[in-house]
Amino acid sequence: MIQEEIAKLKKEKDFVILAHYYVDGEVQAIADYVGDSFYLSKVAVDIPNKNILFAGVSFMGESAKLLNPGKKVYMADDTADCPMAHMVTEERIKEVREQYPDVSVVCYVNSTAEIKALSDVCVTSSNAIKVVKNLDAKNIFFIPDNNLGRYVAKKLPEKNFIFHDGFCHVHKSIERGPLEEAKKIYPDALVLAHPECTADVLELADFIGSTSQIIDYATESTHDKFIVCTEMGIFYELGVKNPQKKFYSVGHRQFCPNMKKITIEKVRDVLENPEKEVILRDEIMESAKKPLEKMLELAAK
Ligand code: 13P
Ligand code: SF4
């Protein structure tokens, strides 16, 4: 069985497997650690194994490498990349810094290492409010996700925000009209939404949080029906933790094609023949690690 092959290879070659909640359930099931972007960053710092295999998109593997540079990090599929990570340019950051010299650049982790290298601090969807609140700066340039930026800004009226126009196409495809329809079909279901969703969807949400926070909320809730506004991979863990509860999607477009490139066969192949290593230039390693470490520090306060 492929699961046994993977377990054997992992041991032989001293690998640990990290997976995001958006990859297929079959891959989550063989991972050593599964979580949201923040949890996976924290885990990466203390990994004792020689090698990390990342079942997620490029920016996640890069973050693991930045936070634990002594390890070799391999991607299950090195073409799995988040389009949002490329939605802000280095030029735009420089332009805003020139125009507003006291601005702090707050970078959603869904960004390339090159963009992180030009930022002051990183955030994930689970810690963005706390990190920006704890950040010693009033003027914020929030990149690249417009929806997350506006969500954070609403919670922190004491700060001034400049937004960028980045977005996640998966969360953007979850629209208010179909959500209203779903609410009519399941009137007693609570709506759980990821902050990458558009503001008109977030308005209808009973709970807004990262993937881990959504799972925790549903698990602790006394409700038993939920409409879930985020990528479908989350249904695996929601089901494992809550076999008696019902989870509904809004239509059929909640799939991240990049996360879905990761298959259990590719995980086995990389363990067998480790080839897709994350390599970052030294100067990027140095400067991109700082905003990630600052995130860990401010999120722990
Ligand atoms: P979290 O892992 O913070 O929930 O973010 C989801 C995401 O879009 C990762 O691509
Ligand atoms: Fe990027 Fe959206 Fe896919 Fe997350 S779900 S990896 S933000 S495209």
Image: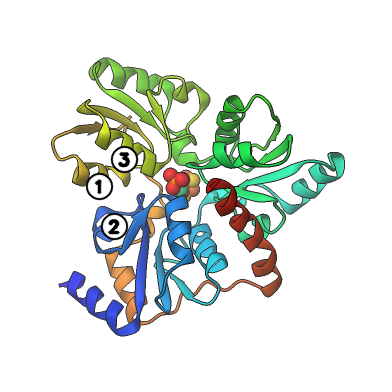
The reply to whether callout 2 and callout 1 are in contact (CB within 8 Å) is yes
Q: Position of residue 146 (x, y in %)?
A: 60, 35
Whichever of labels 2 and 1 marks the residue nearer the N terminus, that label is 2
Q: Give the amino acid at mark 1.
A: Tyr
Residue located 70% across and 32% down the image: 161
Quarter of the image with the N terminus in it: bottom left
Real-space Cα separation, disc 1 to disc 3, in angstroms: 10 Å
User: Does the closest atom of ligand 1 sit within 8 Å of the Cβ of label 1?
Assistant: no
- Sort mark 3 into few (<14), some (14-19) or many (20+) by Cα contacts within 10 Å: many
Q: Give the amino acid at mark 3.
A: Ile
2 up-or-down from 241: above or below: below
Determine which residue is flagged by label 2: 28
Residue in the foreground of this view, choosing between 59 and 67: 67
Residue located 78% across and 41% down the image: 103
* Element at label 3: helix
199 up-or-down from 31: above or below: above
* Element at label 2: helix
Q: Give the amino acid at mark 2.
A: Gln
Determine which residue is flagged by label 1: 236
